[in-house]
Image (tube, rainbow, N blue to C red):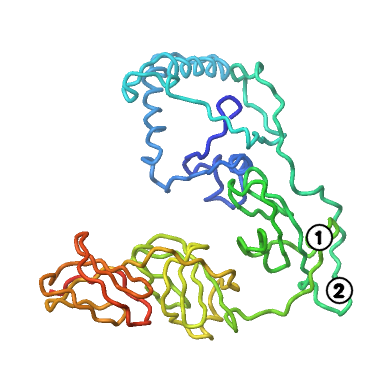
Amino acid sequence: MRRHGIPEELLTDNGKQFTARFGRGGEVLFDRICRENGITHRLTRPYSPTTTGKVERFHQTLRRELLDEHGPFDGIEHAQQVLDAFVADYNTHRPHQGLDMARPADRFRPRLNEGLPLRLPADLRAAGALPNLEAEPETVAEPVLVAPVPVPVEPATPVMSANGMDPVDLAVEFTRVVPASGNLTVCGQQFWLGTHRAGLTLTLRADAGTVELLAAGVRIKKVPSRLTIQHLRQLIAEGGTRLQPAAPARPGAGGAVEVERTVNASGVVSLGGRPCPVGSPFAGRRLTVRLEGAVLHLSDGSTLLRSLPNPLTDDETARLRDARPAGPAPRPVTEPVRVQRRVSSRGWIAVAGQRIGVGIGHAAATVTVEAADATFRITCAGQVVAEVARTTTKPIARFKVRKPQR
């Protein structure tokens, strides 16, 4: 990375040197280096060597062009020197058929990112003598540390407020600046915010149950807290503001709630153990489901994608898993909603309970309906067939055409 720059992402298999995915958990050194330098570490599926097929194929080239013709090495240092010479010839002199007989060095361009300086652990040392390593500067610019210097933590004694509240009610508000890596760390708990938010000042409200992150008063995310009472006392001692504990609110009681759900391949999400169709165009996407009264809003976090009837009662909403109080309402899209319908043999279609005559000449054809606030515009093969006034106030619950019945 010192020589060629920091990559945007890396693809590896599931070896123990790369990840602890199949171990006891935690974070290995390789993952730590990727996290601190803003590198997306992608892993292959288990038992899928074809995902890293280029690496597997390179093993064959290395064996045929070097190992099969070379005798035993005198030692690790000798093997490293021979391998370095092979790599130099492979990249700078050997033409490659996959590159139209060009050389990799002719195509490669270093990626130098001045906004994210290289960050390596202080105890990291090179294994063996690498070529030209002595000629490179050893000093590496360290990024500015956002978190303040930790103070000694007092013994774990119960913290009781003046009115005799339980320690779990301790809450604190403080500010932090997102580092260049986009990964904010507070008392050992990490919050991934993305490199696009680097330099943004956030307000964090934390207690023993949850941590809420806000930017300019707008909540970005709310996650479970791994902070202990000692951590909260430490944050208060470092300049944080102690908050008065609020009465525990029951999700869904008297207000809107939000949950995060992934739409399955059939366009269905699960709410309270009940399947709720939201539309096959959103299959595979992670969306925010906002339940407010009798309406269900589907959004990507900021933009309203679809509004549907709420299938849950207040009691079922209150028992939703991972429910949280809803933030600002999503902004509606400016474009009209488009749905598809198949014209009946009599030349009719139905949208939101309203029957629209298209004409018997379009029987069995699939038409597109643009649903605005006051009109329905029907098009077929790019041509406008009809435009009628909208007389229904029912929400649209079906967006794709049904399969023709046999």
Q: Circle 1 — which element? A: loop
Amino acid found under the numbered disc labelled 1: Gly
| Image quadrant assignment for residue 71 | top left
Q: Is residue 240 left or right of residue 182?
A: right
Circle 2 SS class: loop
Residue 121: x and y in percent read: 69, 36
Q: Position of residue 294 (x, y in %)?
A: 47, 83
Q: Earlier in the sequence, mark 1 or mark 2?
A: 2
Residue at 89%, 76% in the rendered image: 162
Q: Nearer the viewer, residue 114 or 286?
A: 114
- How many numbered marks appear? 2
> Label 1, label 2: how many angstroms apart (C-alpha)?
18 Å
- What residue would you read off at disc 1? 240
Which mark is drawn over residue 160?
2
Check the image and report above or below for 355 versus 150.
below
What is the x, y in percent for residue 334? 43, 64
Q: Residue at x 85, y 70 (%)?
A: 159
> In the image, 306: left or right of 32?
left
Quadrant for the N terminus in the image: top right
Graded by Cα atoms within 10 Å as few (under 14), some (14 to 19) or many (20 or more), the crowding at tag 2 reads: few
Q: Residue at x 38, y 33 (%)?
A: 54
Mark 1 in CB contact with mark 2 (< 8 angstroms): no
| Viewer-proximal residue among 31 and 262 | 262
The answer to whether residue 297 is above or below residue 2 is: below
Residue type at mark 2 is Met
Q: State the image quarter where residue 230 is shown.
A: bottom right
Q: Residues within 10 Å of mark 1 (few under 14, many from 20)?
A: some
Residue 140 got which mark?
none
